[in-house]
Image: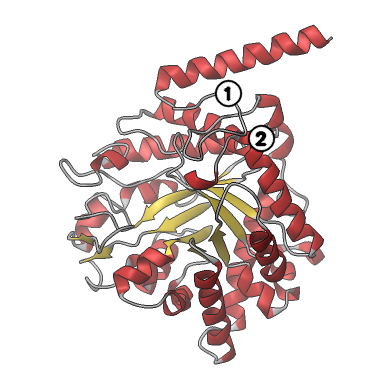
Amino acid sequence: MRRLRRAWLVLVLAAVGAFAAGTGVSLLFSDSDSSPPNRVLNPAPAAAAPSPATTAKPVPKTSGRSPAARAARLPTAQLVAQLFVVGVHGTTASRGTLRSVRAHGWGGIVLGPANWLGPRPTRRMTAKLAAAARAAHRQPLLIGASSDLPGVALPHGTRAASARRHAAVVGRAVRAAGVNLALAPDADVGTAGGPLEQQAVANAPGAVSRVVTAALQGYRRAHTIAAVGHFPGQGAAAGDPETQPAPVGQSLAELRARDLRPFAAVARSAPAVVASNAIYAAFDGATPAVLLPEALTGLLRQRMGFRGVVMSDDLLAASTTNHTDVGATAVALRAGADVLYVPGGPRAQDRAYNAVLAAWRHGEISTARLRASAARVLALKRAYRIVH
């Protein structure tokens, strides 16, 4: 029996490795605690990831445990915390990180290249984070993999069939590390010669739509949440919104004809959408889209019918672009985001959290608004069996 299991494992690794080599997915299969933190993703054996056949079954609905009922029972401090996903430092669950998880009950954690050592050490870290939340009687965590982890983003020129396989492999790889959310795929339409062209899968909206649709199927197959970026499309931005003010000069009609088409194609199937930090001439030409109700509530939810979770991009970057403190930026939860992503250290995260809590106390954000977003977050967690 042992020999049969070993032979099966070798076959699985060989098959997935052959796919990775054939499609340009940079995924290595060695795993070492001494690996450098910026190494590519290293999937553990496929058997370590939950099987979609057993995890994708719908959870029976019970009124007392519905997402809305859960949100209504949460104290306001925990209700607000469910709307934050935060970055952490290092490759281990430090005392400060564990203390923050226990104290706040964050909605989730996002891991980047500096947090990744491969599936086994990362799984030890994520297990400690999950245990800290559980011990403090907090809601289970979303644990995300950022798109700049090598191997997560789809390369420019990827075709739909490859995108589906790529997403399934990445989904299983991160699941093996205790991660349940990928900040991918990107639905941005590239612009020839533009600074973000290589970050887009294609320069034609039809091609991007097909690739993103296929990638979502792959992530669903791996039972991993996919957060599609960056609404309303930043492929034509004049710079990188993560590092500088990045204007997008198209009119709303031009956005509809090009950049919005991939989002329209997946509006009914994407579990989450990430809002862009770029600045759009189609709106006020000065405010990042993540802070604009016209973009998130008016366009994405009301016009396009999106019912999933809207997540902000890096709010520290948005604060820099908007020349505001991260606390003031976080209060822009009113624009329509459900989840606020704040990387960096505990000070910035606490400022953002306290600003939202203060806005609620002063009547600037209603309890109903907080509960609506928390219910979406909890519904997402329940759909992927993170909560039951």
Amino acid type at mark 1: Ser
Q: Position of residue 212 (x, y in %)?
A: 41, 39
Residue at 53% in and 83% down: 365
Position of the N terminus, as image quadrant, is top right
Q: Which residue is mark 2?
A: 120
Image side of residue 33 versus residue 215, left or right: right
Amino acid type at mark 2: Arg
Image side of residue 348 versus residue 304, left or right: right
Question: Which residue is at the front of the view, 361 or 91?
Answer: 91
Q: Position of residue 171 (x, y in %)?
A: 56, 36
The correct choice, above or below, for 25 with respect to 100 in the image is above
Q: Position of residue 252 (x, y in %)?
A: 23, 62
Residue at 67% in and 78% down: 77
Question: Which residue is at the front of the view, 315 or 296?
Answer: 315
The correct choice, above or below, for 303 with respect to 385 in the image is below
Q: Is residue 127 visible?
A: yes
Residue at 59% in and 56% down: 109
Question: Which residue is at the front of the view, 5 or 343?
Answer: 343
Q: Which mark is residue 102?
A: none
Q: Position of residue 376 (x, y in %)?
A: 60, 63
Q: Quadrant of residue 52?
A: top right
Q: Which residue is mark 1?
A: 30
Q: Secondary structure at mark 2?
A: helix
CA–CA distance between discs 2 and 1?
10 Å
Q: Secondary structure at mark 1?
A: loop
Q: Residue furthest bottom?
A: 362
CB within 8 Å, label 2 to label 1: no
